[in-house]
């Protein structure tokens, strides 16, 4: 009976492993097939793209690349601009959001719950509602057509703050902070040497989300940026799409 149970258990484990491999292979294929479609579309002409899906590459790859990088629209410059904005926004967002979450998590003071509620309430305000006032403010401060309005406001990110706060509540015990303070560590040192290393998973997740959001952002840069050489990649792609 023991040997039969072992054989039955091994066959059950083998079946589950086989199913897991099949599912993972299928998911991997579904993820990679879109990269193949992207490559195929880069080899097709504009008229061919309008006909729909094609399974095999065409012959317009070199011509498309030449038109892209040597055309009237500075796509490479737009990629660099988007990279600078996205990296700077991600770094400022995760650092100061983690610092704000640490202040709410690690201290007990009057108005703590009210401040936390106020920050969460800001999450309910759409960007479009404050766009006009934001543009007027940046214009009056002579910051229009610069990257400052696209990077510095990322310091105040309620969604990132909320994620960091929830992560700290479940992974950062108050006893650890008290022990560091008893040992004589200052608050900045505690935050940089204890809190941030423990927050690496949350920081990595929010850095990716913030980077992608800043990279894909079209609305705010289109309102702020006017110079052609300062425009981000989404704006330039929209102009490129309009030309063709």
Image: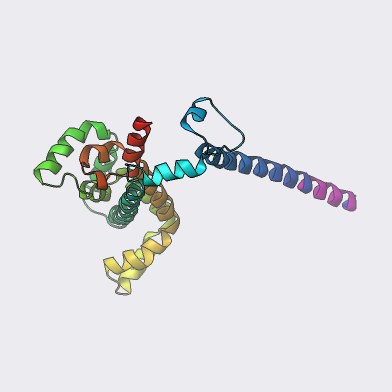
Rendering quarter of residue 19: top right
Residue at the outermost top position: 51
Answer with left or right where residue 26 lies relative to residue 44.
right
x and y, in percent, of residue 205 in the image: 43, 50
x and y, in percent, of residue 126 in the image: 27, 33
Which residue is nearer to you in this view: 2 or 131? 131
Q: Give the residue displayed 21% in from the left and 35% down from the top.
A: 131
Residue 125 visible to the viewer = no
Answer with left or right where residue 50 lies relative to residue 75.
right
| Quarter containing the C terminus | top left
Q: Is residue 5 magenta?
A: yes
Scheme of colours in the image = rainbow
Rendering quarter of residue 182: bottom left
x and y, in percent, of residue 92 in the image: 29, 55
Picture mark count:
0
Residue 12 visible to the viewer = yes
With respect to residue 217, does 178 lie above or below? Answer: below
Q: Main secondary structure of the magenta part?
A: helix
Rendering quarter of residue 217: top left
Q: Give the residue displayed 34% in from the left and 52% down from the top.
A: 80
Residue at the outermost left position: 140
Answer with left or right where residue 90 lies relative to residue 44.
left
Which residue is nearer to you in this view: 123 or 59? 59
The magenta stretch is 3-13
Residue at the outermost bottom position: 183
x and y, in percent, of residue 24 in the image: 65, 44
Q: Is residue 58 magenta?
A: no
């Amino acid at each position: 009976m023991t040997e039969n149970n072992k054989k039955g258990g091994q066959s059950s484990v083998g079946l589950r492993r086989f199913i897991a491999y099949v599912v993972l292979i299928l998911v991997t294929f579904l993820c990679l097939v879109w990269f193949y479609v992207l490559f195929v579309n880069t080899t097709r002409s504009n008229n061919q793209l309008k006909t729909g899906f094609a399974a095999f590459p065409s012959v317009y790859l070199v011509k498309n690349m030449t038109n892209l990088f040597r055309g009237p629209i500075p796509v490479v410059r737009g990629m660099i601009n988007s990279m600078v904005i996205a990296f700077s926004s991600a770094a400022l967002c995760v650092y100061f959001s983690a610092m704000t979450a640490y202040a709410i998590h690690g201290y007990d003071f009057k108005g703590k719950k009210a401040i936390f509620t106020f920050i969460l309430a800001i999450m309910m305000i759409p960007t479009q509602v404050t766009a006009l006032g934001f543009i007027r403010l940046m214009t009056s401060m002579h910051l229009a057509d610069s990257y400052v309005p696209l990077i510095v406001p990322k310091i105040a990110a309620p969604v990132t703050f909320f994620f960091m706060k929830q992560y700290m509540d479940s992974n950062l015990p108050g006893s650890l902070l008290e022990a560091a303070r008893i040992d004589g560590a200052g608050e900045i040192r505690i935050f940089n040497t204890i809190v941030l290393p423990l927050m690496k998973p949350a920081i990595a997740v929010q850095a990716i989300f913030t980077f992608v959001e800043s990279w894909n952002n079209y609305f705010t840069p289109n309102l702020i940026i006017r110079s052609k050489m300062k425009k981000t990649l989404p704006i330039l792609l929209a102009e490129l799409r309009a030309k063709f």
